[in-house]
Every structure is written in C-alpha cells, then in structure tokens.
Amino acid sequence: MDGEQDYRRALGAFATGVALITADAPGGPAGLVVNSFTSVSLTPRLVLWCLGDRSDRFATFSVAERWGVSILADSHQALSARFAQQGSTASQDNVFERLAGAPVVDGAIARFVCSTRDRLTMGDHLVIVGAVEAFDTQSGDALTYFRGRYGVARTEG
C-alpha cells in the first residue's frame, strides 16, 4: 500500500473530534471543518490547525488574523457535513454567535477565539498557530470522526 487513498485510509484510523474554524468574510461568517485542531502550549495558550492549500476557502483563512474554533457537539453533524464540503458558504440559519468579537457556533461544547500568531507552510498545508484570547465550555457529547464516519464521544454519568 502506497497510494494516496491508502494513505488517507491509514490516517482515518486516528479518531478525532470535529472542529469548525470560523472567520469573518464579506458574505458573513465563513466556516471550515477540520480534524487537525490541537493544543500547542498551555503557557502561553496556543493552538494550531492545518489548512489545505487546495481548499476553496484558502483565500479567506490563510490571511485571517482573528478566528474562532468551535468543538462540535453530537447535535452538529449536519452543520459539520455542510462545512466539510467544497463550495460551502456562510450559514443562513443563524448557528453563529459572537464570543469576544469572533464568530463561533452556538451550542458547541468548547469555543476558542484566537489571533494568528504564526503561519508555516508544510507540504500541501498551511499550519496556522493561534494565541487563545478567550474560550468557554459547556457540557455535552462530542461529535467525532473515525474512518470516514461520524460518531459520538459520550460524557460519563
């Protein structure tokens, strides 16, 4: 096995949460689903995510100086599916609200507002590092992604 699809299947064996990155754009909040979101540092508070250079939203997100991250709840599967597709546009159903001035998803189980700290080109992706300016959390079950399918990580209790 050494083809691109084989490699994608192998990477898909890593179960992840689902994050929706959002930024202001001329037509309203733009969104992009990623599973590359991760913490970089606790002090200072830094996170990163990766943006594919072939994304139709590259022009918006590659230059965004401020953006939101919403860790999606299990009830957000349809929203995730919409913003994972090429050509998706700003939501018309008012799922976004403002946290510290940035668009985030109402009802997400964790939300972060970040300012871009660094951008690094690595292969066919732009790695975007953000300084966390604000965050909040709420209880709930998380939307997950594993081997090309959605699932749920349940909270205990």
Image (tube, rainbow, N blue to C red):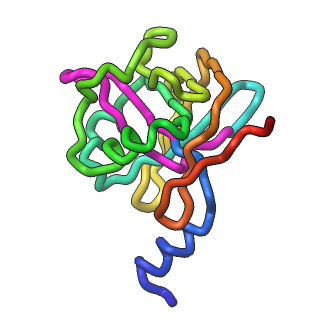
Q: In which quarter of the image is residue 89?
A: top left
Q: Give the range drawn in magenta.
A: 19-39
For image coordinates 50% across by 9% down, the residue present is 100
In this rendered view, identify the residue nearer to me: 109 or 3.
109
Residue 155 lies in the magenta stretch: no
For image coordinates 37% across by 38% down, the residue present is 79
In this rendered view, identify the residue nearer to me: 2 or 92.
92
Give the farthest residue toward the front: 157
The total number of labels drawn is 0
In this rendered view, identify the residue nearer to me: 93 or 5.
93
Q: In this image, 141 relative to 116: left or right?
A: right
Residue 86 image position (x, y, % from top left): 25, 50
Residue 28 lies in the magenta stretch: yes
Residue 8 image position (x, y, % from top left): 47, 71
Q: In which quarter of the image is the C terminus?
A: top right
In this rendered view, identify the residue nearer to me: 48 or 83.
83
Q: Looking at the image, is 5 positioned above or below residue 99?
A: below
Q: Quadrant of residue 25?
A: top left
